[in-house]
Amino acid sequence: MSPDPLMMRAVQYDRYGGPEVLSVRTVPRPSPGPGQVLVRVHATSVNPIDVKIRSGAMRLITGRRFPKRTGLDFAGEVVELGSEVTDLTVGEHVWGILGDFSGREGAAGAYILAKAQAISAAPSGTDLVAAAALPSVGVTALRALRDTLRLRSGQRLLVVGASGGVGSTAIQLAHARGAHVTTIAGAANAPFCRELGADVALDYATAPPNALKKEFDAILDCHGSSLRDYRRALRPGGRIATTSSSAIPFALLSVVLPGPRVRLLAALPRRADLKTLADHVDKADLRPVIERVYPLDEIQDAHRATETGHARGKRVIRLV
């Protein structure tokens, strides 16, 4: 019997918990409404926020309505356009970020609905499976360097927690901007960071934050610890930003403390930023960094691996 074209495979869960709550099910295939696009998903990737949402750590935001879907990043092809969508075409390769954290939608499924203004043409310089590793981490790193840290050519940037998704992307983008990049990660990841464009690669164990010189114009923290000490490594007028939710209390406190304020970062879907990222990929300034590609049926394993916090880049879920 041929598959029902009105149904599709997607990952859902009925309660908050560990990776074991995730299951692949057959669910109705959605239809696009006004301003929406139906995308056949070739791949998605797992972000730390996906793990936090699934665990219930963000239940005040995500609520208790189940079943929920998972996955924010996606790359795929347009298969149907809703009314009022005039700037995309059926068959076009696109990528993007789902902006809904409630779990009503999730990119870990054969098809998704996306707002037309929140997706962009995927880069032509890489395949769609690899492209799925970049949207969230790419937008976060891009906005951090360009808008929050205002990094300029010749300035000195410190990236803490540099081997993960945001960190590995930021190294490449900062190098392309002409900045001097210093990274802090595990010793085993030092060659990896230098390969991506780091000028200096330090080890957590031998470079404690309180021993750093006061020489950095900007600090991007992707780790979430010792921010008080890292702030002291900034030159006068320097700026610091963090992607870590564990750093939220100190970031809020830094508003009233002497010294630079710690700014919080988040990736929100915006077509202009996705286009900028695609341009960087196509110019070979940026490449997706992938730890491993998993089939959809092994998404539990991808979530478990992401929970360890140890990775070189992203874990990607392949659907096509």
Image (cartoon, helix red, strand yellow):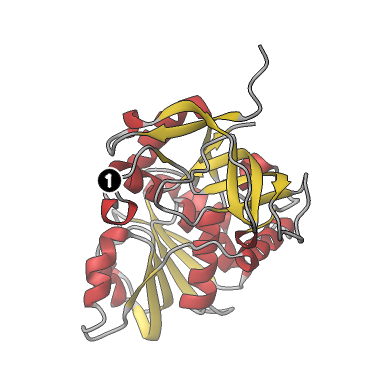
Quarter of the C terminus within the rendering: top right
Judge whether 62 appears above or below 300 on screen.
below
Could you tell me the amino acid type at mark 1?
Gly
Give the camera-side residue of 235 and 114. Answer: 114
Judge whether 27 appears above or below 39 on screen.
above
Tag count in the figure?
1
In percent of width and height, residue 12 lies at 42, 34
In percent of width and height, residue 44 lies at 55, 41
In percent of width and height, residue 103 lies at 41, 46
Instruction: Report whether 108 appears left or right of 111.
Output: left
Residue at coordinates 38% horizontally, 56% vertically from top-left?
161
Give the camera-side residue of 212 and 117. Answer: 117
Whether residue 316 is visible here, answered yes or no, is: yes
Residue at coordinates 37% horizontally, 49% vertically from top-left?
186
Instruction: Report whether 124 appears left or right of 207.
Output: right
Give the camera-side residue of 157 and 86. Answer: 86
Structural crowding at the residue carrying mark 1, measured as other residues with C-alpha within 10 Å and reported as few (<14), some (14–19) or many (≥20)? some
In percent of width and height, residue 50 lies at 40, 46
Give the camera-side residue of 76 and 47. Answer: 76
Q: Which residue is mark 1?
A: 56
